[in-house]
Image: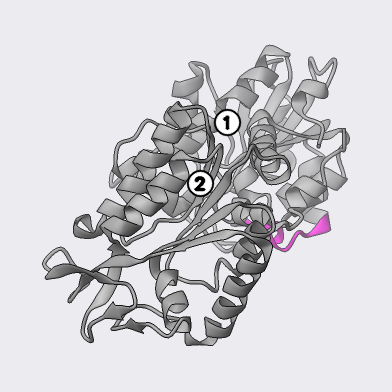
């Protein structure tokens, strides 16, 4: 485990350089349209404010690739953050330089400032040591609360952490590490993982690691059809990665050897077009007619998944089991979400990760608090589940 802001003593009057993830969408009027990520960092910002630190936030927005793009300035983010904090946020027009230092020198204890988009400098993503030093020169200690960017070895996530001491996690980062770490290292059993998504290739390392830790693994979504083809099934026009057929066979063999139950769709919803206007029918997952493609789990599969989820004490859900973005193909993913929600209500621990999973929860208007933990990190949570070391975490002080 890493040290967190709670391990720091006497930070009154000290300048805290805090990396946060406020990469949020804007509406057509340039206002923040989803403030979930901003709300997620409030506990850390409020904790540092209450302890009397001078809070200097750094964040990125979009992919400006070193260009100072007006539409990617952080002014709307600063405005929304100030509204949520119910206190002023000093927004700066740059993130390094003498003018920035001068403005920051005017801060009082408990004040909050937000630097301009750090990706306006290419040096950020290149983890440039001189750029990291210029950022480090702004503060006395470092806090990383941006789990969503922790898998990147950037100047603001890794470079600065090696230059400032102490370098600790924020409360959100700590929560992520505890939630993901505990289910992977010491899960209550039975432990089920639901891994969905369109491609096997993006989840290979995740599946390989989970096979060594879980009692049951559900493989859903588009990757279903690669596995079904590997078993000799007829998959019609369904998405399939032919270069991953051998991997699929090997994985099924490994699961059998380890005594891990694999749930792969027995039946699916097939459509003759990938739209809400499609003709649809339920078919066996290994007998999909030509001209049709599998787009969602079928009723037998949904029941098998729901039953397994409700029997489990620990649930990790990463990825949908169908193309839920299209209303006609949403039932499978919705049923999984409701089963996970019910199991959590009955005392199971549930951890959800990945942008598509979170999008499903939002689409079905489910209470985020009805799950034990929803990870804010897409790529970061995936790499953590794979068992990889995250540079932004590794650079922080050990407990």
Residue 243 rendering spot, x and y as whole percentages? 53, 87
Tell me: 351 left or right of 337: right
Judge whether residue 128 is colored magenta: yes
Q: Considering only vertical position in the picture, is 45 above or below 147? A: above
Q: Considering only vertical position in the picture, is 82 above or below 182? A: above
Tell me: 132 left or right of 124: right
Q: Residue at x 56, y 37 (%)?
A: 313
Tell me: 347 left or right of 256: left
Residue linked to disc 2: 23
Residue 270, labelled with which disc? Answer: none
Judge whether residue 91 is colored magenta: no
| Front in this rendered view, residue 394 or 311 | 311
| Front in this rendered view, residue 28 or 216 | 216
Q: Are marks 2 and 1 in contact (CB under 8 Å)?
A: no
Residue 245 rendering spot, x and y as whole percentages? 52, 83
Residue linked to disc 1: 41
Crowd tier of the residue under label 1, counting other residues whose Cα lies within 10 Å: few below 14, some 14–19, many 20 or above: many
Residue 299 rendering spot, x and y as whole percentages? 27, 56
Q: Considering only vertical position in the picture, is 227 above or below 328? A: below
Residue at mark 2 to residue at mark 1: CA–CA distance: 12 Å
Q: Earlier in the sequence, mark 2 or mark 1?
A: 2
> In this orientation, does residue 181 appear?
yes
Residue 209 placement: quadrant: bottom right
Q: Residue at x 16, y 68 (%)?
A: 281
Tell me where the magenta segment starts and ends, as one range: 121-129
């Amino acid at each position: 485990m890493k040290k967190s802001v709670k391990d720091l003593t006497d930070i009154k009057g000290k300048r805290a350089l805090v990396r946060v993830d406020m990469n949020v969408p804007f509406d057509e009027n340039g206002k923040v349209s989803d403030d979930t990520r901003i709300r997620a960092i409030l506990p850390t910002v409020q904790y540092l404010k209450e302890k009397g630190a001078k809070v200097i936030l750094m964040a990125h927005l979009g992919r400006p690739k070193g260009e100072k793009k007006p539409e990617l300035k952080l002014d709307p983010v600063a405005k929304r953050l100030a509204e949520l904090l119910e206190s002023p946020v000093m927004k700066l027009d740059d993130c390094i330089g003498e003018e920035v230092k001068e403005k920051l020198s005017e801060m009082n204890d408990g004040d909050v400032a937000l630097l301009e988009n750090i990706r306006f400098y290419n040096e950020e993503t290149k983890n440039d040591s001189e750029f990291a030093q210029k950022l480090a020169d702004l503060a006395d200690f470092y806090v990383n609360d941006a789990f969503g960017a922790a898998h990147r070895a950037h100047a603001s996530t890794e470079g600065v952490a090696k230059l400032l001491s102490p370098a600790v996690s924020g409360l959100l980062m700590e929560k992520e590490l505890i939630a993901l770490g505990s289910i992977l290292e010491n899960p209550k059993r039975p432990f089920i993982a639901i891994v969905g998504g369109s491609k096997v290739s993006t989840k290979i390392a995740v599946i390989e690691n989970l096979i060594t830790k879980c009692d049951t693994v559900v493989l859903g979504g588009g990757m279903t059809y690669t596995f079904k083809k590997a078993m000799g099934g007829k998959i019609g026009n369904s998405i399939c990665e032919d270069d991953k057929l051998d991997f699929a066979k090997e994985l099924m063999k490994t699961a059998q050897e380890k005594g891990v139950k694999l749930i792969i769709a027995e039946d699916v919803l097939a459509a003759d077009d990938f739209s809400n206007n499609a003709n649809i029918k339920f078919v066996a997952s290994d007998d999909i007619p030509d001209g049709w493609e599998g787009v969602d789990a079928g009723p037998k599969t949904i029941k098998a998944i729901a039953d397994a989820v409700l029997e489990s004490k620990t649930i990790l859900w990463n990825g949908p089991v169908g193309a839920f973005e299209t209303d006609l193909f949403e039932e499978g993913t919705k049923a999984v979400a409701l089963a996970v929600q019910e199991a959590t209500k009955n005392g199971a621990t549930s951890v959800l990760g990945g942008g598509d999973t979170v999008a499903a929860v939002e689409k079905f208007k489910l209470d985020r608090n009805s799950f034990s933990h929803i990870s804010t990190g897409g790529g970061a949570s995936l790499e953590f589940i794979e068992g990889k070391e995250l540079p932004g975490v590794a650079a922080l002080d050990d407990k």
